[in-house]
Image (cartoon, helix red, strand yellow):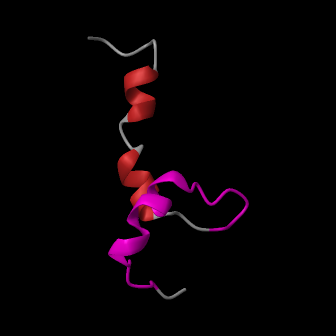
Amino acid sequence: MTKKKIDPKDNHANQLNQNKGSDGVNQQNAKVHGNRGKQLNPNQQK
């Protein structure tokens, strides 16, 4: 699979798009939401 260059004008749309159903990862979305799951996990120590 080839990586496409990320276009800055698509940044906002990419941050919101999870690409559900596709066999790939939206890197911008992953970076935005990367720590969110850990923060919401009730088992995490403060």
- What quarter of the picture does the N terminus occupy? bottom right
Magenta span includes 15: yes
Q: Quadrant of the C terminus?
A: top left
Quadrant position of residue 22 = bottom right
Depth check, front residue: 16 or 22? 16
- Of residues 35 and 45, which is closer to you in this image? 35
Q: Position of residue 12 (x, y in %)?
A: 42, 59
Rendered residue at 38%/77% (across/down):
6
In the orientation shown, which residue stands out farthest toward the front? Answer: 9
State left or right for residue 8 relative to residue 17.
left
Quarter of the figure with residue 3: bottom left
Name the residue located 39 percent from the left edge and 65 percent from the top edge: 11
Image position of 35 with respect to 27: above or below: above
Judged from this view, the residue extending furthest toward the bottom is 2
Residue 9: in magenta span: yes
Q: Is residue 35 above or below residue 41?
A: below
- Quick check: 45 left or right of 12? left
Disc tally is: 0
Stretch in magenta? 3-23
Q: Is residue 36 left or right of residue 45?
A: right
The residue that appears at 44% across and 13% down in the rendered structure is 43
- Coordinates of residue 28 in the picture (x, y in percent): 40, 60
Q: Nearer the viewer, residue 4 or 11?
A: 11
Q: Residue 32 location in percent, x, y?
A: 37, 48
